Image: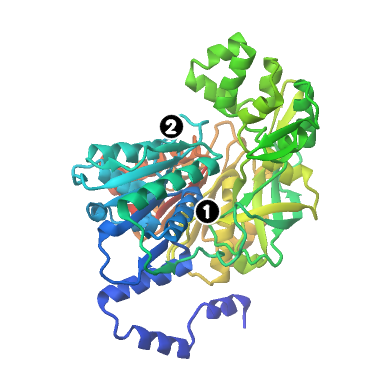
C-alpha cells in the first residue's frame, strides 16, 4: 500500500465504527445533530471551552458569556484561562470564538466579557469581523440589559494600539450596555495585566450573577495538541536538529530552513499553525548595554518578585532587541536629550524611531544616569516569537520545520540582529536546546474537502505555510488543484525551496506556479502583478470555489495583493468597487479568504 493511501485510510471509519455512529445518531433530533456536528468539528479543529450546567433549563441571564477575537491565539488563550477560572469559582460559562457566535444573538446575552486582539492597522481579527460590523450597523439592538467588560490586546509600537478592543467597548456603550469594569488595554507583555483584569472581573461577575454550588458539566473541546502539557507558559525544551541557509551566497537576505525535533513531547499541529519560540538574548549585546550604562553584570534586580542578576535579567527575561515607545519616552525624560524629548511630541515619528533602534542604540544616543532597577522596570518582558510552520506532521512526524529570515541591519559601527531569528539562525548550534510551544491558528486552514482548489500567495518567508499545505495535501491524497504565487528579489539567489516546487509540478500536485522576482529585470515585478496578468484564470478559480490564502508582509504586500484582487473582481466580474469589496467579504465570511500577515 502506498504511504499516502495508508494515511488516508487511517482517517476513515471502519465498518464497525460507522455502524456504531449511525446507531448513536439515529434518534437524534435536528438540533441534537447540529450540536453533535459542531462538537465533532471542534474536536477536530480546536475550539472553545463550553461550561454547561447539569440542569437543562438554565436561563441566559445566569450565564457568563466570554467571546474572543484572536488572530494568532493570544486572545483565545486568555479567554480560555478566564473561562476555567470563572468555572472554578462556580460560574456558568459559555466561552467561544466570535466566529462561532451569531451576532444577532447578543440580545439574549446578559453578561459578556470580550477578549480581543487587533489585526493589521486597527482591524479586527478575522473571526471578529462579523460581530464588529454588526454592532456598528443599524441592525444592532439596544442592549440596556447587558453588562460587559473588554480586555484589549495590542502592541504600542503600532499606531492603532488595541483599536479592536476600543471599538467593541465604544459600540456596546453606545447601544446602552453597562460596564462591569473599565476596559483594560494590554501591550505585548500582557500576562500580568490580563491576570489582574480576570481576577477583578470574576469577582464582580460573581456579585452580579451569583455563583452556584451545584455541579457543572465541562464540555471540553480541546485544541489539537491540548493533551500535551506544554504551553506558552510551560514550553517544551526541544532540540534544534537543522539550521540551513537556503538563500544563495550573493543574496541580500539570509533565510534559514530550521528543523526542530519535538521528541516525545506529544505536541501536535496542523498546517496553518505557528510555532512559538522562546529565546535568550545575545550575551555580547547584553554586555554592550551593561558597559554603556556603567552597571555591574552581577548587580541584583527584581522582576515580578524574582531576584536575579542584571546580566541574567537582560539575557533571558527582558526585551532588548525590540524597543517600545514607552521606553523611548522614559529615556527621553531621564536623559533630557533635546532630540529625544522633541521626538515624543510626534507619535508617528516616535513609533518609527523605536522600530529602527534597539535599546542599546537609544541609551548610547542620549547618555543618562539611572538606577539599574529603574532601567529594568522601563523595559518590556521578553515575549516569544511566532513563526508560521513550514511542515505537515503527516510528512515529518515528530519534527516541526520553520522558514526564518534572519533580521540584520547596520547601526553605526555595529551589526544589529533580531533576537529570535539570530538565536535560531546563528547563535544556537545544531543539537542545542530551544523552548517551544504550538500556537494554533484556526483562521488559516486548508479546506475540509480535499477536492477544493486553493490559491496560495506567499512571497519571501511567507512561503512557509504553503510548504506545509502541499505536504498535507500530498499525504492525504487531496485531489484539488493547487496554484502558488511566490516572489522575492532574484531567481538565482532567493527561490526558496525551488527543488521541492519543481518536484510538485512534475508530480502534478502543484497545478500551477507563478513567480515574481523583482530585481531580475529593469522594471520591478511583484506577486500582485502576476495576479493581474492571470486575472481571468484567478477569477475563474474563485468562481469555482477556490480558497484564497495570503501570507507575508502586512504593511505593503498584503494591501497591494488585496487591491489587485479587488481590481480583478471588478474587471472580470463586471462589478462595482462596492460589489467587489462585498465579494471579498463573502469569501472571508465563508473562510475562503484567509490571511496570515505580520
- Which of the labelled discs sits on residue 3, or is there none? none
Quick check: can you spot residue 536? no
- Look at the picture and state if 7 lies above or below 100: below
- Which of the labelled discs sits on residue 484, or is there none? 1
Residue shown at the point (43%, 86%) measured from the top left: 18
> Pointer 2: what residue?
160
- Horizontally, residue 143 falls left or right of residue 425, namely left
Other residues around mark 2 within 10 Å, as few (<14) / some (14–19) / many (≥20): some
- Horizontally, residue 300 falls left or right of residue 587, namely right
The quadrant where residue 170 appears:
top left
Other residues around mark 1 within 10 Å, as few (<14) / some (14–19) / many (≥20): many
Q: Nearer the viewer, residue 12 or 215?
A: 215
Residue 396 on image: x %, y %? 66, 65
The quadrant where residue 28 appears:
bottom left
Residue 232 on image: x %, y %? 60, 52
Q: Nearer the viewer, residue 307 or 495?
A: 307
Of helix, strand and loop, which one carries label 2? loop
Colour treatment of the image: rainbow
Residue shown at the point (40%, 46%) measured from the top left: 201
Of helix, strand and loop, which one carries label 1? strand
- Horizontally, residue 508 falls left or right of residue 560, namely right
Q: Nearer the viewer, residue 578 or 554?
A: 554
Residue 564 on image: x %, y %? 41, 41
Q: Nearer the viewer, residue 340 or 470?
A: 340
Residue shown at the point (57%, 64%) measured from the top left: 225
The quadrant where residue 322 appears:
top right
Quick check: can you spot residue 239? yes
Whether pointer 2 and pointer 1 mark residues with C-beta atoms closer than 8 Å, the reply is no
Quadrant, the N terminus:
bottom right
Residue sitting at the far top: 338
- Horizontally, residue 539 falls left or right of residue 517, namely left
Amino acid at each position: 500500500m502506498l504511504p499516502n493511501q495508508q494515511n488516508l485510510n487511517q482517517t476513515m471509519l471502519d465498518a464497525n465504527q460507522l455502524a456504531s455512529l449511525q446507531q448513536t445518531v439515529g434518534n437524534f433530533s435536528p438540533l441534537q445533530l447540529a450540536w453533535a456536528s459542531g462538537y465533532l468539528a471542534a474536536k477536530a479543529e480546536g475550539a472553545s471551552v463550553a461550561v454547561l450546567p447539569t440542569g437543562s433549563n438554565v436561563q441566559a441571564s445566569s450565564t457568563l458569556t466570554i467571546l474572543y477575537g484572536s488572530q494568532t491565539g493570544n486572545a483565545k488563550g486568555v479567554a480560555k484561562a478566564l473561562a476555567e477560572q470563572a468555572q472554578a469559582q462556580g460560574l456558568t460559562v459559555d466561552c467561544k470564538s466570535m466566529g462561532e457566535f451569531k451576532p444577532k444573538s447578543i440580545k439574549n446575552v446578559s453578561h459578556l466579557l470580550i477578549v480581543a486582539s487587533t489585526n493589521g492597522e486597527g482591524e479586527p481579527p478575522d473571526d471578529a469581523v462579523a460581530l464588529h460590523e454588526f454592532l456598528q450597523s443599524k441592525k444592532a439592538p439596544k442592549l440596556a440589559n447587558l453588562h460587559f467588560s473588554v480586555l484589549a490586546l495590542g502592541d504600542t509600537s503600532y499606531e492603532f494600539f488595541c483599536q479592536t478592543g476600543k471599538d467593541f467597548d465604544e459600540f456596546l456603550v453606545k447601544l446602552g450596555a453597562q460596564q462591569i469594569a473599565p476596559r483594560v488595554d494590554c501591550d505585548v507583555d500582557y500576562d500580568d495585566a490580563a491576570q489582574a483584569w480576570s481576577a477583578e472581573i470574576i469577582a464582580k461577575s460573581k456579585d452580579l450573577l451569583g455563583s452556584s454550588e451545584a455541579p457543572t458539566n465541562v464540555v471540553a473541546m480541546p485544541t489539537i495538541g491540548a493533551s500535551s502539557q506544554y504551553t506558552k507558559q510551560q514550553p517544551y525544551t526541544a532540540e534544534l536538529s537543522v539550521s540551513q541557509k537556503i538563500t544563495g551566497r550573493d543574496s541580500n537576505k539570509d533565510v534559514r530552513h530550521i528543523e526542530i525535533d519535538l521528541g516525545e513531547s506529544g505536541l501536535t499541529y496542523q498546517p496553518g499553525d505557528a510555532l512559538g519560540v522562546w529565546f535568550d538574548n545575545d550575551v555580547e549585546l547584553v554586555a554592550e548595554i551593561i558597559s554603556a550604562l556603567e552597571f555591574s553584570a552581577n548587580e541584583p534586580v527584581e522582576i515580578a518578585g524574582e531576584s536575579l542578576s542584571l546580566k541574567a535579567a537582560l539575557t533571558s527575561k527582558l526585551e532588548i532587541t525590540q524597543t517600545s515607545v514607552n521606553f523611548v519616552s522614559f529615556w527621553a525624560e531621564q536623559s533630557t536629550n533635546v532630540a529625544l524629548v522633541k521626538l515624543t511630541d510626534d507619535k508617528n515619528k516616535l513609533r518609527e524611531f523605536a522600530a529602527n533602534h534597539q535599546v542599546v542604540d537609544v541609551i548610547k544616543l542620549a547618555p543618562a544616569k539611572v538606577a539599574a532597577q529603574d532601567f529594568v522596570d522601563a523595559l518590556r518582558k521578553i515575549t516569544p516569537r511566532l513563526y508560521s510552520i513550514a511542515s505537515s506532521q503527516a510528512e515529518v512526524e515528530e519534527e516541526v520545520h520553520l522558514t526564518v529570515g534572519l533580521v540584520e541591519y547596520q547601526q553605526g559601527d555595529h551589526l544589529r540582529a533580531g533576537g529570535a531569528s539570530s538565536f535560531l539562525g546563528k547563535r544556537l548550534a545544531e543539537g542545542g536546546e530551544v523552548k517551544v510551544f504550538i500556537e494554533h491558528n484556526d483562521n488559516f486552514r486548508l479546506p475540509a474537502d480535499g477536492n477544493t482548489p486553493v490559491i496560495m500567495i506567499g512571497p519571501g518567508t511567507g512561503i512557509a505555510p504553503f510548504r506545509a499545505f502541499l505536504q498535507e495535501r500530498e499525504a492525504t491524497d487531496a485531489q484539488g488543484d493547487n496554484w502558488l504565487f511566490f516572489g522575492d528579489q532574484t531567481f538565482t539567489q532567493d527561490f526558496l525551496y525551488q527543488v521541492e516546487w519543481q518536484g510538485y509540478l512534475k508530480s502534478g500536485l502543484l497545478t500551477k506556479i507563478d513567480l515574481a522576482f523583482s530585481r531580475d529585470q529593469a522594471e520591478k515585478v511583484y506577486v500582485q502583478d502576476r495576479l493581474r496578468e492571470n486575472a481571468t484564470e484567478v477569477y475563474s478559480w474563485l468562481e469555482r470555489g477556490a480558497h484564497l490564502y495570503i501570507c507575508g508582509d502586512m504593511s505593503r504586500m498584503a494591501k497591494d495583493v488585496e487591491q489587485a484582487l479587488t481590481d480583478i473582481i471588478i474587471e472580470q466580474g463586471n462589478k462595482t468597487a462596492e460589489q467587489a469589496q462585498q465579494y471579498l467579504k463573502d469569501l472571508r465570511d465563508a473562510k475562503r479568504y484567509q490571511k496570515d500577515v505580520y
